[in-house]
Image: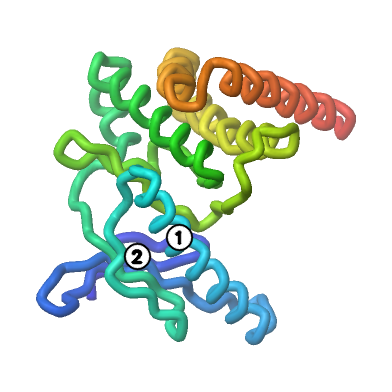
Amino acid sequence: MRVIAKGAEALLYLEDWLGLTVLVKERTPKGYRDPVFDKMIRVRRTINEARLMMDAADLGVKTPVIYDVDVVRTRIRMQYLNSPTLNHVIKNNGYSKLVKELMNRMGALVGMLHNGGILHGDPTPANVIVNNGDEYLIDFGLGEKLKPTWDSKYLRKAALDLNVLLRSLESNYGEYSEQLFNDFINGYSSVVGDGKAASVGRWIKRIRSLARYYTGRLL
């Protein structure tokens, strides 16, 4: 076992499994939670993430192949992609033609998810792996699946998803975050349609204006 990352919720490590080098995502116990409640949360999130990854693959969105889901140990064994994240590619290449194309393609992939009723929860460049020219979406731990009604409730959910991306871009690439987001939206629009994309955009503006309003009230 070789640990490659330790997050707030899970431990990521490599393991030799049936002759394959696989990536294992194991949700570790949280001492501050009641043990029974903690196990219930970890089991539920493990099952939910695995289902969302498989559902995303059914929609045509590339995700690491899942080999095994262990609900007792609350871990998922999956394909190990030894490739850089989109975040890494952007940092190494700046706002280049390659990055523009990758952001556009990422937008199309997230559009496919939203059309299929999947909200990723954390759709940032750090959760996209660029492998042999293809993009794989990872870390569906905060995701959920709804009926894609595209009513006000669903539009708000989709907008919250994209607002996470926008905030991430602003935080990491302030100087060209707007261009990156526009490239993403172009890809997103090509899948969901200009009308739905525009409606999501209006909801993003509404969410951000409300956030500024409440921050101001707190001050």
Residue shown at 76% from the left, 22% from the top: 209
**Location of residue 58 in the rendering, given as x and y in whole percent from the top left corner:** 37, 51
**Amino acid type at mark 1:** Gly
* Residue density around tag 2, few if under 14, some if 14–19, many if 20 or more, within 10 Å: many
> Can you name the residue that lies furthest to the left here?
19
Residue 180 in view: no
Q: Earlier in the sequence, mark 1 or mark 2?
A: 1
**Amino acid type at mark 2:** Leu
Which residue position is annotated with label 2?
Answer: 12
**Location of residue 121 in the rendering, given as x and y in whole percent from the top left corner:** 55, 46
Position of the C terminus, as image quadrant, is top right
Q: Is residue 151 above or below residue 67?
A: above
Which residue position is annotated with label 1?
Answer: 7
Q: Horizontally, is 210 left or right of 160 in the view?
A: right
Disc 2 on helix, strand or loop?
strand
Q: Nearer the viewer, residue 9 or 133?
A: 133
